Amino acid sequence: MRLFISKNKKWFGYLLFALILTLALLYYRFPSDAIRCYLQAEVERANPRLVLSVNRIEPRLPVGLKFIGTELVLKDEPDKAILRSDSLLLKPHVWSLLRGKSEYSFHCLAYRGEVGGSVYFEKDRTRGSIDTEIELRDIYIGDYAYLLQLVGHSIEGTLGGTLSYKGQYKSLMDASGQANLRLSHGRVVFLRPFLMLEGVDFDEIEIEMVLKKQEIDLTRLELKGRQLNGTLSGTITLKEVLAESSLDLRGTIEPLAEFFKSTGGILDTVDFFGQGLNRGMISFVIQGTLMDPRMKST
């Protein structure tokens, strides 16, 4: 083998030079605009209500694309971004492509954190399905302005956890999936005063939920904070306009010493709750919609 390489040294040199030249030309003559137009057309085909914009697309070795400055917005409300990322690295699974499948891994920098995972697209255009698994790390949701529009009130904190989703492009809610999330060191601001508070700070919120047939089964939500602890479970029936999704939730609240200090004293607060305070706990139900939740003690 060494003798073969020695005798053909110059040919290996030419081959290496040609490879380097090809890679250089591919990088500097990369058809960024053509790929951008193709992706924008594919997004519009999959969901005519959405518009994709990308500032720049770069190749990444050995096989991959890096998208710089990506936004996904509603066509009717272009000033409100559904998704905004600083950079997105997309790599195809080579062996899946050879088998005629569209499977990719991705890594995204967005909202001061990271999003990674894998996604599989069904090539059959009549079905148009998507199957994905996602891991969130250190996402600051206070920067996600679209969330305020969805739920109708401000939420801050750092989000992490895992999500899985399987469904069709044209009916994103009629799908299946699950989520295990943790939101830490944040604050929720209420639409109207709740338990004599305008909002509540928390140390941690842990969430477990399952999506199936346009319904979210909230199996567990547990809040821990300096002012109060709480639990919540139940169902959210999804509507086309997410803010109109109906609520059927049940939970408990445990006021802590810091809560009584912030509301003016134990006696006044207990008098406010009346008979609702039982063994230091308050039981309640939440009905109505995401935009207009209605709560009452039980």
Image (tube, helix red, strand yellow):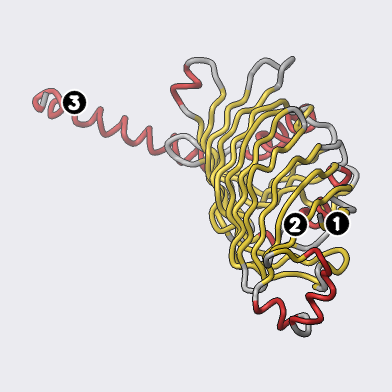
Would residue 161 be found to the left or right of residue 247 on screen? left
Question: Residue under circle 1?
Answer: 296
* Above/below status of 171 relative to 101: below
Which badge, 2 or 3, comes first in the chain's sequence?
A: 3
Q: Residue at x 70, y 76 (%)?
A: 259
Q: Give the secondary structure at mark 1.
A: strand
Question: Residue under circle 3?
Answer: 8
What's the distance in space between the residues labelled 1 and 3, CA to CA?
85 Å
User: Looking at the image, is mark 1 or mark 3 nearer the viewer?
Assistant: 1
Question: Residue under circle 2?
Answer: 283
Q: Residue at x 75, y 66 (%)?
A: 277
Q: Give the secondary structure at mark 3.
A: loop
Q: Residues within 10 Å of mark 3 (few under 14, many from 20)?
A: few
State the residue in front, 167 or 281.
Answer: 281
In this orientation, does residue 243 appear?
yes
Q: Are marks 2 and 1 in contact (CB under 8 Å)?
A: no
In this orientation, does residue 28 appear?
no
Residue 86 location (% of width, % of height): 62, 55
